Image (cartoon, coloured by chain):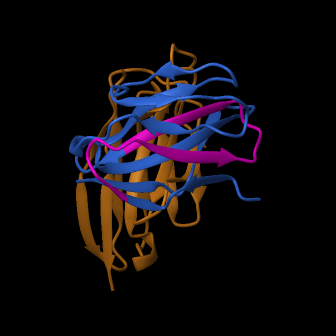
Amino acid sequence: IAGITQAPTSQILAAGRRMTLRCTQDMRHNAMYWYRQDLGLGLRLIHYSNTAGTTGKGEVPDGYSVSRANTDDFPLTLASAVPSQTSVYFCASIEKTERSYEQYFGPGTRLTVT
Amino acid sequence: TQLLEQSPQFLSIQEGENLTVYCNSSSVFSSLQWYRQEPGEGPVLLVTVVTGGEVKKLKRLTFQFGDARKDSSLHITAAQPGDTGLYLCAGAPGWSNSGYALNFGKGTSLLVTP
C-alpha cells in the first residue's frame, strides 16, 4: 500500500515561474489537505478538499490554487512563485474512524524559490 | 483557529533519561493526536486519544488526554536515540468550514544522544 505519494521530492524554482506539486493517494479518503511547514511556524493549512469536486481555502491560501477532479489526486499550483513560498509542502488525507479522524501525510516536497 | 501550545520547544537529553512533552490549549477538542516526524519525512501518527482522562501506552511512550479535553502530555521512559525527532500534537475540533482539518502545535524537537 503506497498511501500518499508526492512529486517532485524537491525542486529549485526561479521566481515568477509556474509550478504544480502533485499528490496522489490510494486510500480512497474523501478529504485531502495541503500544508506548508516552516521553521518556527509549524504546519499551516493552505487549501483543503472535503470531497472530489470541492475545494476551500485554509490559513495561508494566497499565491496557491488547487483542484480536485477525482478522489485520488489533489495538485497544488503556484501560479507565479515568490521566494516566500520556499518551504516544505505536505499533502495529507483524513480517515474517519469510529472514535475520531486521523490524518495521513505524504513524504513532502521541498521547494526552494530563488 | 484554536491554538495548541507545545512545550518545551527543544529538548536535548541523554539515552536512558525520562522526559515529558506538553500540549496545551484553551479550547476543547473532540480528540487529540500525537505525531512523530523524522528529518526529510512527513509526520506519522502515533496515537489518538478521545476520552477525557484517557491514558494510552505505546511501548515506552505514555500519552494522556486531560480531563477537560484541552491538554495532553507525552511521557517517554528511558529515551533512546531512535526516539529523536519532532513530536507534534494535533487537536480535532470537529467539523468546521475547513472540514475535519486538524489544528497542529508547532512541535517539540527531541534529540537523544547515546
For the N terminus of chain B, the image quarter is top left
Residue at 48 percent of width and 61 percent of height: A9
Which chain appears orange? B
Dominant secondary structure of the residues highlighted in magenta in the image: strand
Q: Is residue A21 magenta?
A: yes
User: Visible in this render: residue A94?
Assistant: yes
Decide if residue A56 is on the left or right side of residue A58.
right
Q: Colour of chain A?
A: blue
Residue at 53 percent of width and 58 percent of height: A107
Image-quadrant location for residue B80: bottom left
Q: Position of residue A93 (x, y in %)?
A: 62, 39
Q: Is residue A112 magenta?
A: no
Residue furthest to the top:
B97
Residue B33 higher or lower than A56, as above or below: below
- Comparing B36 with B78, the one in front is B36
Decide if residue A97 is on the left or right side of residue B70.
right
User: Visible in this render: residue B107?
Assistant: no
Image-quadrant location for residue B87: bottom left
Residue at 40 percent of width and 72 percent of height: B79
For the C terminus of chain B, the image quarter is bottom left
Q: Position of residue B110 (x, y in %)?
A: 32, 64
Residue at 24 percent of width and 69 percent of height: B12
Q: Which residues are magenta?
A: A12-36
Residue B45 higher or lower than A93, as above or below: below
